[in-house]
Amino acid sequence: MDFFLPEDNLTRAVPEETKISSLSAQPYPDGRRLRVNIEITPFQQRPYIEVILHDSTGSEIASTSIVEPMSWKLEFTMHIRGQLNNPYALHARLYYPEGPSKEPLIFSFDVEPPSATASDSPEADPA
């Protein structure tokens, strides 16, 4: 069931024309999480989206699948596992299970390690 408010006056793309129009990612200051933003062309039929995070060696660090999103503006958090290994590449692919599939969009970025605070250092341990 597709539900859209009729007063939005947007032209919605058919599955063959639906695509990811914007992909970006911003690491959180803790160096362990990533805020991902995806914008999709307004659609008539809800697509599927697969997002995979790779490190510099090409290893998969995190992934998520979004099934039939309600909106064309998505924001979510991904977790960075293991040691930091810059640069990272975020791959996002839009597809329909029984229809067209698009080539993935790729967004590359670096993650800064969190700065050490006084409470993290061994000298701060009172014991």
Image (tube, rainbow, N blue to C red):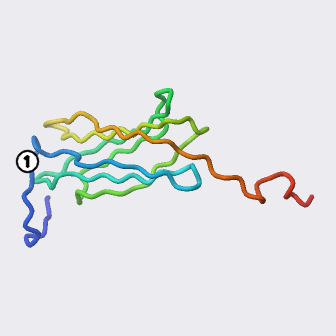
Q: Residue at x 56, y 49 (%)?
A: 32
Q: Quadrant of residue 5?
A: bottom left
Report the side of 112 relative to 54 (left or right). Answer: right
Picture coordinates of residue 77, whole percent (x, y)? 44, 54
Picture coordinates of residue 40, whole percent (x, y)? 22, 51
Image vertical order of residue 83 relative to residue 26, above or below = above
Within-10-Å neighbours for mark 1: few <14, some 14–19, many 20+: some
Picture coordinates of residue 91, whole percent (x, y)? 35, 38
The amino acid marked with disc number 1 is: Val
Q: Residue at x 36, y 41 (%)?
A: 107
Residue farthest toward the bottom in the current orientation of the protein = 7
Q: Quadrant of the C terminus?
A: bottom right
Image vertical order of residue 114 relative to residue 109, above or below = below
Report the side of 117 relative to 79 (left or right). Answer: right
Report the side of 122 relative to 56 (left or right). Answer: right
| Mark 1 residue element | loop
User: How many marks on residues?
Assistant: 1
Residue farthest toward the right in the current orientation of the protein = 127
Q: Nearer the viewer, residue 110 or 52?
A: 110
Q: Residue at x 58, y 39 (%)?
A: 84
Q: Quadrant of the N terminus?
A: bottom left
Report the side of 104 relative to 112 (left or right). Answer: left
Image vertical order of residue 105 relative to residue 27, above or below = above
Residue that label 1 marks: 14
Picture coordinates of residue 102, whole percent (x, y)? 20, 36
Q: Residue at x 7, y 67 (%)?
A: 9
Q: Nearer the viewer, residue 38 or 70?
A: 38
